[in-house]
Image: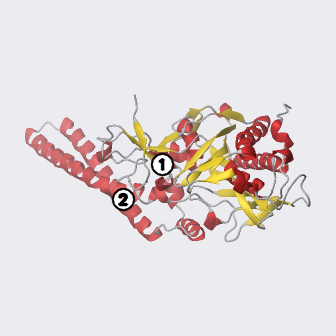
Amino acid sequence: MLKATFALNANRRCLSSALYLTGDKAREQFAVLVPYLDFKHKLGDLERLKRNIRLRRNPLDCDNLIRQWELYRDVEKRKREIEQCRVELQKRIQQTTCPQEQQQLKARAILARDDLKMLKEQSYQVADAFIANNFLSIPNDLHEHTPDKEMKCIYEKPALANPANQSSNVDLAQEQLEEFGPACLYMTGDAAWMDLRLPMFCSELFRQNKCILFCNPDFVRSFLVEAAMVDKESLFLVREEDEPEDKVNLLHLCGGGSLLSFLGYFTKLSVFPSALPLRLVASGKRYHFERAQSNEVQVFGAHISAEGAEEMFDEMVQTARHFYDQLPVGYRVVQVAAPNLRPIESMRVDIELLDGRNQRYVKVGELGYYSDFLSKRIAFIYHEGKVQRFPHVIAGTVMSTLELIKLLLGNGITMQDLPKLNTFVEK
């Protein structure tokens, strides 16, 4: 039986990557996943790469990355040359009939073998420095719709003048949300009912719009956290019984309502093209380090082509808008600018509700487009004949109850103002 404890701090850091293990480390650590390393696409156009890094304001040092890339290529080229030399020597040894020449060739073959062994040992450090610490840190390519500097509003619903039964003089959030520190929150009354019914209603709307209801695990391993380029410090670390001190593939608590919880299912998954497109929706907890947990609705989609994935992206945005249209508050959908994107995202839209009491917008949902970047990192593939292809992925948290409930109750909106939360009408 597994015994584990939750770490109250996240100060423990892995000494090496769990996503990419070099040969020397793979002798002691189990390599769960080998990501697809697309050197040609990522490093084939250095000007595009530098522009991407600049617009995102990413700290990656492009000059150092290029130097590491050149060193890595030189080492790999030298390994291939020695290997080819060994093959040629082996052929000559088999072909010669002169004992003296055969002895000389065998001596050269032994030296080549020793040289190759030594070079391989040295190449592990080169590969670790280049791939694990640099190449896998390269962010996704920016989508053409992503603004360079400032966000762009693509839809806005104005606030209602006088929402039914709304009392702007009473902040119900203070009465029904009791906070005991940043990570502890207790809900009562309408807050508790909303926390139960909002995710149910949102998930049902997506189910009615071609999505399959999914149930995800609450825990995830380090290699998936790295694959999604999520900071491990933002997650609770689970310390397992008899865990070696040098173990790199650790266990983290993320919750079933997060992108990470989807990735375990799709990692190293090979599907027929007929299985795509996929549209999934899952409702579950989302755990944040030093923040209160929240019930969230997470969607996940995969498509063969970029065009199909972008069309699916628009459809899911429309479904999310349909959900927020049911609420008696104003909101807007904004295209996030490049500096505010996560490294793994190519494009993202945020859903922000208008907090009428404080006259500000509060983010309550988002949807991101990842192209085939994420699929390559988790080896999620489909086949066209004998050729492996990578699906284009979209995903996002379309609703987070915690911020939504705070906003609704803070503006005097109760369950009486949300009658549709109590009914789920089948189409």
Image coords of residue 331 (percent x, y): 80, 58
The answer to whether 181 appears left or right of 406 in the picture is: left
Q: Is residue 324 visible?
A: yes
Image coords of residue 254 (percent x, y): 54, 45
Identified by mark 1, the residue type is Phe
Mark 2 or 1: the one toward you: 1
Seen from this angle, which residue lies furthest left? Answer: 100
Q: Is residue 155 above or below residue 253?
A: below
The answer to whether 126 appears left or right of 356 in the picture is: left
Residue 333's label in the rendered image is none
Image coords of residue 311 (percent x, y): 76, 47
Identified by mark 2, the residue type is Ala
Q: Nearer the viewer, residue 405 or 112?
A: 405
Q: Nearer the viewer, residue 99 or 236?
A: 236
Whichever of callouts 2 and 1 sits on the residue coming sooner in the sequence is 2
Q: Is residue 63 above or below residue 364?
A: below
Q: Is residue 280 above or below residue 166?
A: above
The answer to whether 3 appears left or right of 82 in the picture is: right
- Helix, strand or loop status at disc 1: strand
Image coords of residue 379 (percent x, y): 52, 41
How far apart marks 2 and 1 lie (CA) works out to 27 Å
- Helix, strand or loop status at disc 2: helix
Bin the neighbour count of mark 2 within 10 Å (Cα to Cα): few under 14, some 14-19, many 20 and up.
Answer: some
The residue that disc 1 covers is 236
Q: Is residue 398 visible?
A: no
| Residue at point 59%, 59% (across, down) | 342
| Residue at point 89%, 55% (across, down) | 163
The answer to whether 102 appears left or right of 321 in the picture is: left
The residue that disc 2 covers is 129
Q: Nearer the viewer, residue 327 or 415?
A: 415
